[in-house]
Image (cartoon, rainbow, N blue to C red):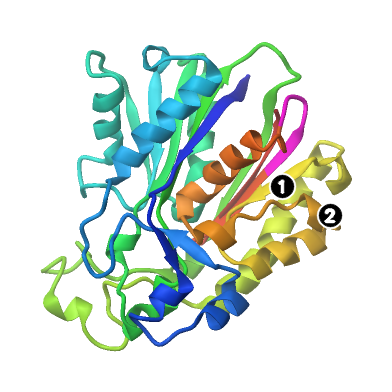
Amino acid sequence: MAYIAGVGQCVPSHVVTNAELSTYMETSDEWIQQRSGIKERRWARRGNESVGEMGNSDMAERAARSALTQARLTANDIDAIVYATMSPDNEFPGSGTLLAQALCPDRAIPVFEVCNHCTGFLYGLSVARAYIDSGAYRTVLLIGSELLSTGLMLSNEGRATAVLFGDGCGAAIVRSSEDPARSILSLDLVSDGAYADKLGVLAPSFARPAPIEVSDFEGEAPAAAPRMDGPFIFKMASLKMPEIILSALTRHGLSAADLDIIVPHQANQRILDMLGQALGCPEKVLSTISRYGNTTAATIPVALSEAVAAGKISKGKLVCLVSFGAGVSWGAALIKW
């Protein structure tokens, strides 16, 4: 039986305000806040210099060491690493191998690379849980890390997504336990490829003669810039997240009233507000989006780490994690902390 024994996080020190973004593109603090709820985000990138203060795996190492400390473990206790990201340091090998070398230079351990975007942490959690419940591993380090700033276009062409995303990493130590009072009660995952074109990037693409071309960075809708059907994603996320939570709760004979806290993916404050309204408990929905923006696979573990540090999550609490993202995919986990 798997449970989360410790969490940690790392975010870049550089705070990027909405006012700073307005110097690169036609936008404003009021416009960004009204549509997303974001006031600022953390970037490793410095302005139009695409050289960051740290890499994806650098953040992961710091977050991992913090989570290990909270779990009262060392890197020698790690049996495997599950690394969820859509922005690795290199196309291949993945950032997980770099993290394994940094943490366990004298040991060879398996590393799983997960690319499920905003639901990456939940998909990664399912991998960790499955291996632990099978008895193959006792301790799995789960990472959700993104360094998205260096891939954003700081111009009017990239404005639709450049104002939304931030950098950050969250880590969780997933362990086996014989105590049913602390466990991952359920983990539900869904994906529907019929809507794969609603959110993503077209380049680089290995499905064409040249994976990347100069023209991919040009025009009003550059192929290399993230593109999103905002109204569609907003509507689907607002419907699917409460739906999958209620389904999981019903299966366990529970209701939203039994939840102590809901830690959702941080994509849009209005989506979080609608989630709370749909479940009838807006006060239980944790929000960090105003300070960090959307850090895709990192949003849930960063928020988890902050909630634990603030005393909002402690032993015996019933915690719900939920996300919706590209693919499209969505999922929810019920955890007895």
> 158 above or below 17?
below
Q: CA distance from mark 2 to mark 1?
A: 9 Å
Q: Which mark is residue 262?
A: 1
Q: Callout 2: helix, strand or loop?
A: loop
Percent coordinates x, y for residue 275 in the rendering? 73, 61
294 or 306, nearer to the observer: 306
Asked if the residues shown at circle 2 and circle 1 are in contact, with their CB atoms under 8 angstroms apart, the answer is yes
- The residue at 32%/54% (across/down) is 44
The part of the chain drawn in magenta is: 314-320
| Amino acid type indicated by mark 1 | Ile
Percent coordinates x, y for residue 226 in the rendering? 36, 71
Percent coordinates x, y for residue 316 in the rendering? 77, 26
- The residue at 55%/67% (across/down) is 38
Question: Residue under circle 2?
Answer: 281
**Circle 2 Cα neighbour tier, 10 Å, few/some/many (<14 / 14–19 / ≥20):** some
| Amino acid type indicated by mark 2 | Cys
53 or 258, nearer to the observer: 53
Quadrant (top left, top right, bottom left, bottom right) of the C terminus: top right
Q: Callout 1: helix, strand or loop?
A: strand
Percent coordinates x, y for residue 294 in the rendering? 50, 60
Q: Is residue 327 visible?
A: no
Q: Is residue 144 visible?
A: yes
> 310 above or below 151?
above
Does 322 appear in magenta? no
Nearer-N-terminus badge (2/1):
1
